[in-house]
């Protein structure tokens, strides 16, 4: 097979890249290779500012992409080798694909603790792993969640009717995204049962199953997108009980063996036990490892590509150290002169942005056109939802890169909103906006423009002043 553009990976980055190429260059052949018959498509994009977007992620059969774009061919197969010299790709079913430009969007795989050591330890990363989790929790009375990122936070909120032990290495919850103040704002939401009945919208996500190819334990599905938990049943067996106990500033020391368990004086005799670094031994029905991800960069034939932090190193064009091979999303590491207010994180928003920009780069370079780096790399933005609240993160939202040399302007209205502005030398550097604040566009502009705000002082967050009027 021959194609001008080939993309490996059916996640958000890969599909966004393929769709953008189909728009930019509809006359060229595009091949998307996905190990799953399910692909992730970004829909319902709502702009909240110049670089801030809110969107949904739908999971569809790969055939829907082909029916929408005549120039795209989707192959449900596994890549076994890439030959950058001859510019060919070999798949497990014997297909050989010739390419002119290749984009690797293989994402990342869950960094599961004690992987394959115990069937009662599962990771959360893709739809298949959540489906496994959903089946296991139906009969569970007590579980342990390990990790303090976005998926762990969403799990804690969405799980019902179960006793939860949350093991985190930080001093406060959700430390990847929020500070101790915001953690305190969310604290009383930990044990509240999620109100599933209040959500009346029709969900169009996760209604398909992967049936076109054989499952195997090593197959990695596409990463979860926003609202991934809405379609899954994640209720335990303890009716109307939700108790969350947090073990702060500790990690898992070891997994207890069967001999260790037999020696324990525990009447319950749980299926699995762990020992924490604080000395506690805790048993449960099963353990959820939500301890981050590692880039999935084990494609054969391109082992000599330069890597940073296990991710494919990419320049400002998202091109790797091998000519005509690009990378986007969780599998790559930015290696250019990064803007002051942008940071790379493994998030679906950045996967979408990188996928679209990689398409622009591949298209422009194939046509020998001049182009400039996308404006989205000027400012870090992320829109998500924690504990039922809209959360907008902008710029250096936790004071990253500032060496603790900054001021914080803070306003909190209990159970309604939490607003934190990062100020240095009178200029806004970042913001955390929780709740329906309607301040995201103003904060975005102030960070990008670097306007001196010294004259306004604490009036920036005075609830009696409509600060947007100042910067209309």
Image: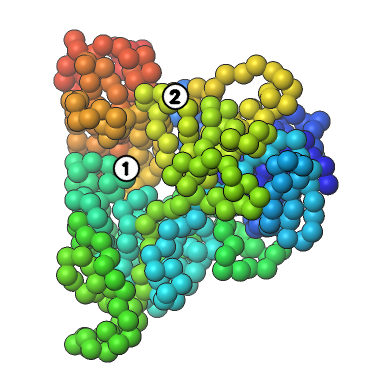
Q: How many other residues sit within 10 Å of disc 1, few (<14), some (14-19) or many (≥20)?
A: some
Residue at horizontal 36%, vertical 14%?
449
Residue at horizontal 67%, vertical 30%?
362
Residue 310 percent coordinates (x, y): 47, 47
In terms of secondary structure, where does tag 1 sit?
A: loop
Is residue 21 shown left or right of residue 229? right
Report which residue position mark 1 lands on: 177
Q: How many other residues sit within 10 Å of disc 2, few (<14), some (14-19) or many (≥20)?
A: few
Asked whether residue 303 appears in the rendered view, the answer is yes
- Specify the color scheme: rainbow
- Is 263 drawn above or below residue 23 in the view shown? below
Asked if disc 2 and disc 1 are in contact, CB closer than 8 Å, the reply is no
Q: Which mark is residue 337?
A: 2
Is residue 342 shown left or right of residue 428? right
Residue 14 percent coordinates (x, y): 62, 43
Residue at horizontal 22%, vertical 30%?
403
């Amino acid at each position: 097979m021959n194609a001008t553009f080939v993309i490996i990976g059916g996640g958000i980055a890969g599909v966004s890249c393929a769709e953008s190429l189909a728009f930019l260059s509809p006359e060229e052949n595009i091949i998307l290779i996905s190990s799953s018959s399910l692909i992730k498509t970004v829909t319902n994009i709502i702009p909240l500012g110049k670089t801030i977007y809110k969107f949904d992620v739908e999971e569809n059969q790969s055939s829907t992409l082909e029916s929408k774009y005549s120039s795209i061919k989707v192959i449900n197969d596994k890549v076994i080798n890439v030959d950058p010299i001859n510019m060919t790709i070999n798949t497990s079913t014997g297909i050989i694909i010739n390419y002119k430009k290749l984009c690797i969007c293989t994402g990342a795989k869950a960094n599961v603790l004690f992987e394959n050591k115990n069937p009662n330890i599962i990771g959360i990363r893709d739809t298949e792993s959540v489906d496994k989790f959903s089946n296991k929790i139906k009969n569970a009375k007590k579980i342990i969640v390990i990790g303090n990122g976005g998926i762990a936070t969403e799990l804690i909120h969405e799980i019902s009717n179960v006793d939860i032990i949350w093991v985190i290495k930080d001093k406060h919850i959700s430390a990847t995204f929020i500070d101790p103040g915001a953690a305190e704002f969310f604290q009383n939401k930990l044990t509240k049962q999620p109100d599933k009945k209040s959500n009346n919208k029709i969900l169009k996500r996760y209604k398909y199953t992967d049936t076109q190819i054989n499952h195997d334990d090593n197959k990695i599905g596409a990463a979860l997108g926003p609202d991934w938990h809405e379609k899954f049943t994640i209720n335990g067996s303890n009716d109307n009980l939700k108790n969350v106990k947090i073990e702060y500033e500790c990690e898992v020391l070891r997994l207890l063996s069967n001999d260790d368990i037999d020696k324990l004086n525990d009447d319950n005799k749980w299926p699995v036990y762990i020992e924490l670094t604080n000395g506690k031994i805790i048993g449960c029905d099963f353990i959820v490892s939500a301890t981050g991800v590692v880039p999935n960069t084990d494609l054969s034939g391109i082992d000599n590509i330069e890597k940073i932090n296990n991710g494919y190193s990419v320049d400002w064009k998202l091109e790797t150290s091998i000519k005509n091979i690009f990378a986007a999303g969780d599998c790559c590491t930015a290696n250019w002169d990064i803007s002051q207010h942008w940071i790379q994180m493994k998030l679906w928003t950045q996967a979408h942005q990188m996928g679209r920009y990689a398409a622009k780069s591949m298209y422009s370079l194939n046509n020998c056109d001049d182009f400039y780096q996308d404006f989205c790399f000027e400012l870090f933005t992320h829109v998500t939802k924690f504990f039922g609240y809209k959360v907008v993160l902008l710029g250096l939202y936790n004071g990253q890169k500032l060496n603790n040399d900054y001021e914080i302007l803070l306003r909190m209205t209990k159970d309604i909103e939490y607003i934190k502005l990062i100020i240095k030398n009178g200029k806004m550097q970042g913001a955390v906006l929780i709740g329906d604040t309607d301040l995201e566009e103003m904060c975005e502009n102030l960070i990008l423009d670097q306007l001196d705000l010294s004259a306004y002082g604490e009036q920036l967050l005075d609830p009696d002043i409509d600060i947007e009027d100042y910067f209309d």
